[in-house]
Image (spheres, rainbow, N blue to C red):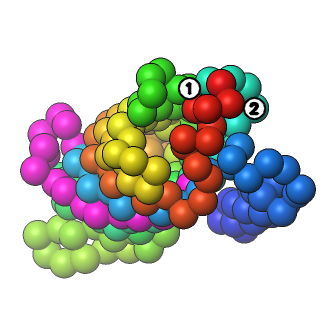
């Protein structure tokens, strides 16, 4: 867990340093994200959770930017089997760090893809007989994400994101994680009209 927090601190420091540099303001965009996540496509489509965080992107070419995001949520994974004889509804706090390229695919649309690292904390398994701490049974995991968003003016966007787990979330079973998120994006800085006029 210490290594995870050190990695996150390093990423935050890198982003902060990039923002602080003397660069053209219109090349940067940053703001807040609110998301509604639907989990458990296999058997629990009705599991919905709300999360939020902050994003930063830096334009490096005509239609290409580097995108980074830190997002937190409280996640519910439905009925799962942690180990033989131990199953129930799994919930955990989740901190996700996204990074990858973002492409301008139209006057008001973006498409991004990349990797995200999920850091799990306070994991609990709600069984028929009570609640169990299953910290020793779960691991942090990495996912791939695909994100599409449509801009409505300079300050607001709506998006859809799909996440697919690349490695097992649990130590004892090979379980993949699929997630779809509907996002509302609020832009604090950067002017999309200035960016488009320079292209």
> From what the image shows, is residue 64 above or below residue 46?
above
Q: Which residues are magenta?
A: 40-55
Is residue 30 magenta-colored? no
Q: Residues within 10 Å of mark 2 (few under 14, many from 20)?
A: few
> Can you give x and y, in whole percent of width and height, for residue 124 in the image?
33, 70
Front residue of this view, candidates 98 and 55: 55
Q: Earlier in the sequence, mark 2 or mark 1?
A: 2
Identified at 44% across, 45% down, the residue is 169
Per the image, the residue denoted by label 2 is: 60
Decide if residue 129 is on the left or right side of residue 100. left
How far apart are the alpha carbons under marks 2 and 1? Answer: 11 Å
Left or right: where does residue 55 sit relative to residue 177? Answer: right
Q: Considering depth in this image, is 72 or 110 the residue closer to the camera? A: 110
- Residue at 29% across / 63% down in the picture? 50
| Residue at the limit of the structure toward the right, as seen here | 22
Residue 103's tag is: 1
Name the residue at 18% across, 68% down.
127
86 sits left or right of 144 in the view? left
Instruction: From the viewer's side, name the closer residue of 146 and 20.
Output: 20
Residue 136 in sight in this render: no
Residue 64, given in percent of the width and then of the height, sits at 65, 27
Q: Is disc 2 placed on a helix, strand or loop?
A: loop
Image coordinates for residue 168, horizontal then vertical, percent = 46, 38
Quadrant position of the N terminus in the picture = bottom right
**Which type of secondary structure does the marked residue at label 1 adopt?**
strand
């Amino acid at each position: 867990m210490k290594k995870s927090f050190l990695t996150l601190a390093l990423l935050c420091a890198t982003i902060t340093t990039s923002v602080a540099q003397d660069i053209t303001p219109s090349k940067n965009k940053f703001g807040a994200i609110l998301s509604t996540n639907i989990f458990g496509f296999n058997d629990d489509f009705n599991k919905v959770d709300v999360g939020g965080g902050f994003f930063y992107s830096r334009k490096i070419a005509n239609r290409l930017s580097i995108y980074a995001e830190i997002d937190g949520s409280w996640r519910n994974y439905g009925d799962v089997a942690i180990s033989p004889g131990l199953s129930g509804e799994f919930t955990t706090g989740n901190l996700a760090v996204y990074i990858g390229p973002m492409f301008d695919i139209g006057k008001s649309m973006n498409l991004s893809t990349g990797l995200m690292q999920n850091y799990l904390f306070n994991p609990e398994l709600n069984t028929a007989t009570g609640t169990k701490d299953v910290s020793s049974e779960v691991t942090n995991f990495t996912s791939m994400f695909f994100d599409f968003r449509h801009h409505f003016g300079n300050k607001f966007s709506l998006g859809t994101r799909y996440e697919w787990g690349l490695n097992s979330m649990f130590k004892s079973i090979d379980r993949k994680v699929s997630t779809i998120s509907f996002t509302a994006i609020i832009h604090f800085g950067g002017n999309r009209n200035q960016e488009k006029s320079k292209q």
